[in-house]
Amino acid sequence: MSLLVIVISVTIAVEWAVHHAEPILRARVVETLSARFDSRVEMKAFHVSVLKGFEVSGEGLEIYPPDDVVEAGAKDPLISLDHFSFAAPLRGLFDKPMHVGVVSVKGMTISIPPREMRQQAEKREPKKGSIKILVDEIDCVDSKLIIGTAKPNKDPKEFDLQRIVMHNVGPDDPWRYDATLVNAIPTGDIHAVGTFGPWVNESPGDSTVTGKYTFDRADLGTIKGIGGTLSSVGEFNGQLNRIVVDGTTETPNFSLDTADRPVPLHTKFHAIVDGTSGDTYLQPVEAKLGQSNFSCTGAIVNVKGKGHIIDVDATVPDGRIQDFLALAVKTRPVLMTGRLNMRAKLHIDPGSERVINRMGLRGGFRLRSIHFSNPEWQDKVDMLSLRAQGQPKMAKPGAEDVSSMMTGQYVLGSGQLNISQLLYTLPGADVNLSGMYALNGSDLDFSGKVRTKAALSQMVASRWKSWLLKPVDPFFRKNGAGAEIPIKISGTRGAPKFGLDLKHKDKDKGGE
């Protein structure tokens, strides 16, 4: 009889718990979230099971922005959950506030309204309400963060979060998190740990964020025109709309498809990131390409529906020209070796075309200790130097290895390098040129003048040829030079053609 009474009592208790727990817990969830976010909360479904304590689950939970942000134009829920669940002991129903260990969440979307809408929201007193449930940990999978924008030329910024675990989820203290998110371009996984918050209801973009991150095996091939596998580590802090990031990157096989030759690239950077727009400001980047050090400052700005505009100022104080040619030029070996000092302005338009077709580069350079990799080119330079010094009998292939230098201005675009004000200096001669060089090595076209120390008659080995040229020496002796000779370089990198530019000389005559 006593056993029957116990069974009946337990049955009544379970029936009471199921009947009363669901509305009690539903009200607690809604009131807690409404008080925490000062917002309207809706929920499509809510279930309670008492087989193993209280097992709670829900679907279609939506937390909307504050009313004045909605009135300013925000339409989407601030936070929406496809499904959530948590468990609590039976006695928890009578605790105020109720304590929950872990809440599991699937399909969470956080949509932060544009800053302009949040700024339109008037300052107001928060709605009255109390926290009915305290949570130790929230474990989210397959989540998404969307940061809206009111600017017509920008797309919302979207991040896919594979998994994020948040600890100590209190109303006033920062939340500790451990997150893994998928970066779209370049494709790769980012793992970050740190703190977030406290959450600012009126302006989520002002919420504080700190952390350390690792970005492993990012495939740069997802950016058309470049290649390589990038890894990065660093740390960050600030507000969501102004994050200060310090880190390093390693790309052992960085390449451009114009050359398709991997060159190691290392960077150390300090950047300001607006997490609400995706705009990044580099202040600065210290980089090493191959064995060449250089630095950059600039900006990467998001453009709606197109990608990013990249504007960077770069300085190479003392690099190796062969490192940069190896990256950009297909022909092997590279055109020349030497020491490079350069300033450059890089601009890359947004779009899906190859990077080299969207890239513009302009600036000035100085090269010293130049040596041409093509023996035919180097022999011609060596022999030109000897003839220009009045030693034509020594001008034979391999007789001397001349070190030369070069300065100039350049513009790079559409796979073509255009050079102006090019001054090429070697012992006995100065060469002034302008022209273009195709990065694939298929086209070469330069013209200009050679100014030599020796007169024209002094640059030929044959005595009778020298005697025949003496009468014409005065026609080529100009501006303090022994001779000033118009020249043209054409053909291809593999088969260059050197010769007199008679049309150029005719123009000079006509202009006198």
Image (tube, grey):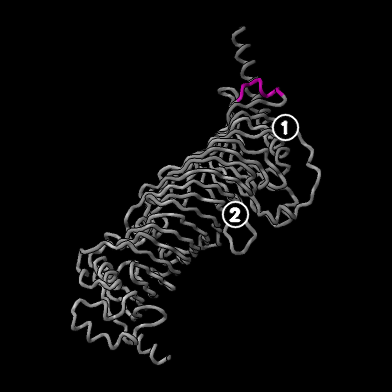
Q: Which is more foreground, mark 2 or mark 1?
A: 2
The structure residue drawn at horizontal position 40% and vertical position 92%, both measured from the top left corner, is 510
Specify whether residue 188 is painted magenta: no
Residue 131: numbered disc: 1
Q: Quadrant of the N terminus?
A: top right
Q: Amino acid at mark 1?
A: Ile
Q: Amino acid at mark 2?
A: Ser
Residue 124 appears in the figure = yes
Q: CA distance from mark 2 to mark 1?
A: 33 Å
Q: Are marks 2 and 1 in contact (CB under 8 Å)?
A: no
Residue 81: numbered disc: none
The residue that disc 2 covers is 277
Label 1 secondary element: loop
Left or right: 445 as drawn, with respect to 409? left
Task: Say which of 97 and 153 sits in front.
Answer: 153
Q: Quadrant of the C terminus?
A: bottom left
**Bounds of the magenta segment:** 88-95
The structure residue drawn at horizontal position 32% and vertical position 73%, both measured from the top left corner, is 444
Label 2 secondary element: loop
Q: Residues within 10 Å of mark 2 (few under 14, many from 20)?
A: many
- Quadrant position of residue 238: top right
